[in-house]
Image (spheres, rainbow, N blue to C red):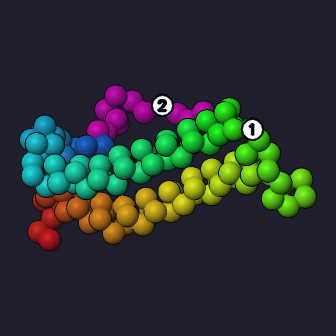
Amino acid sequence: MGIQPTPGEVREPEAEAGLADVDFRETQASEKFQRLRRTHRSFVFPMAVIFIVWYFVYVVLAAFAPEFMAISVAGNVNVGIVLGLLQFVSTFGITAAYVSFANRRLDPQAAAIRADLEGDPK
C-alpha cells in the first residue's frame, strides 16, 4: 500500500497530455476516425465469422459424425484430436494475422489521429 496523495496532488492524465479540451465526440465523427473503424472492421468481422464457422464445424462433426472424427491418423491420434489441435493453431494464426494487420494498417491511422489530437505538426 502506498501513501494516498492529497487532493491538491491529484493530476488528471488528460490535462497532462494536453487532451483536457479535446472534443472526443467530434473526433469520433471525423472522417479519419471513421476510416480507422472501417479498416478495423474489414479485418475483424470476416475473421470472426470464419473462426466461428470453423469452430461450429468442429462441434457439429463431433456431435453428428463421430465415426469420421474417430478415424485413426497415426496410432492413437484420430481426426478429432487433429482438428481439435488445429483450433489452437488457427487461434494463434488469427492473432498473428491481426497483429500484422494492425501494425501495417491500423497503427499508422491511429497515430495520425493521435497527432491531430495532441497538436503535433506531423
Amino acid type at mark 2: Gln
Residue drawn at x 77%, y 41% as measured from the top left? 67
Cα gap from disc 1 to disc 2, whole angstroms: 61 Å
In this rendering, the answer to whether 76 lies above or below 21 is below
Nearest the eye: 58 or 1? 58
Quadrant position of the N terminus in the picture: top right
Numbered badge on residue 66: 1
Q: Earlier in the sequence, mark 1 or mark 2?
A: 2
Q: Is residue 10 magenta?
A: yes
Q: Is residue 21 magenta?
A: no
Query: In the rendered image, which residue does mark 2 sit on?
Result: 4
Point out the residue furthest to the top here: 7
Amino acid type at mark 1: Pro
Residue range corresponding to the magenta coloring: 1-12
Residue drawn at x 25%, y 43% as measured from the top left? 14
Nearest the eye: 10 or 43? 43
- State if disc 2 and disc 1 touch (CB < 8 Å): no
List x then y, in percent, for residue 10: 34, 35
List x then y, in percent, for residue 11: 31, 39
